[in-house]
Amino acid sequence: MFARKRAIVAAGALAALALVVAACGGSSSSGGGTSSASKTLTIAWAQNPDSLDPALTAEQDVAPVDANIFDTLTWLTPAGAVTPDLATSWSVSPNGETYTFHLRSGVKFQDGTPFNAQAVVANIDYITAKSTQSTVALSLLGPCLSATAVSQDVVTISCSKPFAPLLNQLSEPYLGIQSPTAIKKYGASLSTHLVGTGAFSLQSYVSNQKIVLVRNPDYKWAPPALGAHGPAKIAKIVYDLVPSPQSRLESLQSGQSQFIQQVAGIDFEKLKSNFTALSVPISGLGFFTTLTTTKAPTNDLAVRQAILYSVNRQSVVKLVDSGAFPASNTPLLPGMLGYSSTLAGEYPYDPAKAAQILKADGWAKSGGIWTKDGKPLSLTIAAFSQLPEYPLFAQAIQASLKANGMQASVTLEGPSAYINAASKGQFNITPTSYVGVDPSALSVWFLPGALYDWSKYNNTTLASLLNEAQVTSSTSQRAALYLRAQQIIMQQALMIPNRPQADLVLMSKNLTGVAYEGGGFEVFAKASLGG
Amino acid sequence: MSATVVVTQAAAPTRRSRLAGVFRHKSLTVGVVLIAFVIAVVVIGPFFVSHNPDTVNPNAAFDAPSAAYPFGTDSFGRDMLARVLYGGRYTITAAVAIVVLGGVVGTVLGVIAGYFRRAVGFIIMRIIDVLLAFPGILLALTAAAILGPGLVNGILALSLIAVPAYARVAEGATIEIRQLPYIDAAISGNINPFVIITRHVLPNIRDDLLVLTSSWVGLSALWIAALGFIGLGVQPPTPEWGTLLSGGQDYISVAWWITVFPGIFLALFVIGTNLIGDGLRDHFDKTL
C-alpha cells in the first residue's frame, strides 16, 4: 500500500518536473527510453474479461490485452496491409485451399518452449477441439480447420474450401499463438496461466480487479512493421478493471493511471488538450442495429424500411457521443474492402417517405400512432446494459421512432440475457457492434445460421453472395460481391448503420510510443514512460 | 348504528388533541413538512412544467441550469426539472405500492400465524424465516432477474422483502394481544375469529405497523431507485430517480446537475420518511 502511494507521488513529481522542462523549451526527451526500464504503466480498463484465453473470449476488449501477451502469424498494419509476424512469408496453393507459412526461427514462448510448426498445429487443434468451445477464434478460422507441420519451420493450414479472409484474420489477437506446453498442462484453467511469445507475459489475473503483465526479457521478434526492437521498455503493465467511465477519468486525472480507454465522447472532446488523445479506429461493422425479420411487426419489409427512413441517424449519433463521431451510412465502413460510397445515400432521414411506405402497406395513423387492423405499430428494443453506449443508442433510436408515430420500448439486458434474446429474435431492434478486420464480418451477421444471425433473414441470393465472397481470392471481385451483398442488406432493411467504432483513449503526456495494430488493438511493445 | 355515531362523537376531541401531541415532536414535524413538500412538488409540479420529460433535443444537450431549464438538461437535451418531477411520481408511487403490497400480505400472514399458532403458525413463520435468511436486496434481485426488468416486476420483487418484516412484527404483536383475558373471553364466547381479528387484534397492532410503514416507505424508495440504477427497474426513457442517477453518473464531471437534483429529492424523501418513523416510534412508545 505504502510502496504504491510513494510510487504515485514519485511519478507525479517526475511528471511535474517533465512539464517544467518542457515549458522551458528543452527538447532533450531522448533519454526517456532507458529511464522507463523499471516503470509500471497503470491502465484503467473498462471491461472485465469473460476469459483472457484468446481462443475462448468473445469480447472485443480482451483482444488488446492479448495482443501484448501473444504474437500472431501475421500482423495487420493500421492501414490494413498484411505483414509478417511469427510467419516470415507465406504462399497460397493455386486452388486457394492450402496456406503454407514459413516461420520465424529463434522464437521461444515465455515458458521456454520453442516456437515451431508443431506449436502452430497444437494451437489450431486446441481452437478446433469441440471441448474448447471456441466462438470468435473458431469463426475467424472459417473453413480452415487443420494444420500440418511440414518441417520445424514450415506449417500448412488447410481449408475445406478457399477462404480469402484467412491471412487478414490470422493477425487478430484471438488467434494469438499459445505455448503448446501450457495448453497441455493447464487445460480448463489455461485462461489464468496464459503463455505466449509476446512482449509481455501474464503475471496474474484477478477477475473484476486487475490483470498484471510483466516484460518478457527475451523478446526480440516484434513484427517488423511495428518497428520495436528488443524487449519492451516498460517493466510492468497493470490493467485495473474499472467499469465506470467516470472513475476511469478520475484515475487518469489524479495520476493513478497513465492510460484510460473507452472515454465518453463528451469527456474526450473536453479533455483532449490536457492529455495525449488517441482515437484508435476499430475496424469491423462499427456500431449498428439489427432488425429482426422473424418477429412482428419487423417481419414486414415495409415496416423495416419505414424504420430506416424514420431514424435520424445524424441526430442519434450526436445524442450518443456528443459529436465525437460521424454517423455511418453503410454496413461496411470506409476503409474496409467492399465499402462503397454509392450506398451512403440510401435511407436519408425522411419521415414523409416512411409515412408513404406505411400507408401503402395498410397502416393508418390514429392518435399520432401508426396502426393496422386495430393494432399499434409497437417495437421492442434490447439494450446491453453494461456498456454505456448501448442504452444510449437504444434510447436515441426510440426517440426517433416515437417522433414518427411508432411506439418503442427499451429493455436493458445483462450480457448473457442480451445475447440469448437477440439470438432467439425476441426483440425487434437490437443495437450492437462488431469488430473484424475483413469484410467477411458480414457473413458472421447475415449468413443464415451464422454466429450472430440476429436479423434471421433467409435469402439464398444473399447467402450465396456472402459465401462466394469468402472463397474468391481476387480483391476486386470480393469488393464487388460484398457491394452486392450490402445492397441486399440495405434494400431489405436488415440493419441500421450507426457509427464507426473507435476506442477513445486519453494518456498522460509522458507516455509515448503507444502503437496499435490494424483492427484496433493497443500494443505497448515500444511504449515508454518518460519523466 | 346509533352506537357508532356516539363513538365517533366521543372520539373526535381526543383524536384532535392526540394529533396536536404528535406535532409537539420535533423530528416528526420536520419529517411531515419534508414529505408534504416533496409530494406536493411532485404531484402539482408537472402541471407547471412546459417541457415533456421524454422530448429529446440534441441542440440542448448538457445545458447547465438556466431560466429555460432550471435543473439543466441531460445528455439527450431532456429537461431535468420535468424528469425529476415526473420521476418522483414513479419512485414515490412505487415505494407506496411496495409497502401496501408487502404490508398487506405480511400482516395477514403474521396475524394468522400469531392468532392460530400451532401448525399453521409454525409453517407460515418458517417460510418467513427462509425469506428473512436472504439479504433483502439479494432476494429482490433474484426475483427481478426471474420476472424480468420493469416497474411492476420491480415492485413485486421488492414487496417480497417487505413481507417477512411485516409478518414478523404482526405475529409478535398478535401473540401478545392473543394472551389478553378479553380475547380469551371472546374466543370462549365462540365469536368468529375473523371478527376478533378485525375488531380487537388489528386495532391493537396498528401503531406498530404504522411505525414500520413510515420507515419502510423511504426504504422502498431507495430500493426501487437501486433497481432502476442497475437497470432492473423502470426501463428508459421513463424517468425515475434511480435511473436518472444512473444516467448521470457517466457525466458527473461535466454535468453535475443530472445526478445532483434527483439525488436531492430522493434524499429529502427518505430523510422525511425516516424522521416521521422516528417521531411515531417515540410517540407510541409507552415506556418513554
Image (spheres, coloured by chain):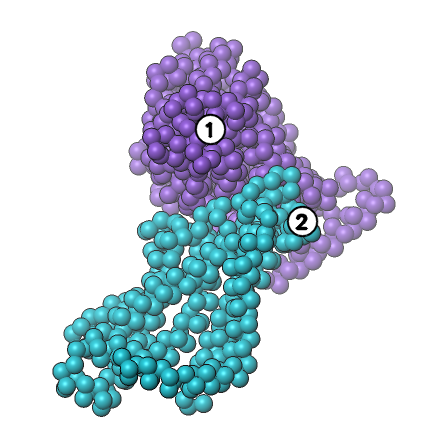
Residue A32 higher or lower than A95, as above or below: below
Q: Circle 2 — which element?
A: loop
Chain A rendering hue: purple
Residue lying at 38% horizontally and 46% vertically, measured from the top left: A189
Query: Does residue A514 appear in this view?
Result: no
Residue under pointer 1: A307
Front-lying residue, A275 or A364: A364
The disc at residue A182 is none
The disc at residue B68 is 2
Residue lying at 42% horizontally and 90% vertically, measured from the top left: B287
Dot 1 surroundings within 10 Å: few (below 14), some, or many (20 or more)? Answer: many
Chain under disc 1 = A
Chain B rendering hue: cyan
Q: CA distance from mark 2 to mark 1?
A: 33 Å
Q: Residue A9: image x %, image y %? A: 69, 58
Residue lying at 58% horizontally and 22% vertically, measured from the top left: A335
Front-lying residue, B101 or A448: B101
The three-letter amino acid code for the residue at tag 1 is Ile
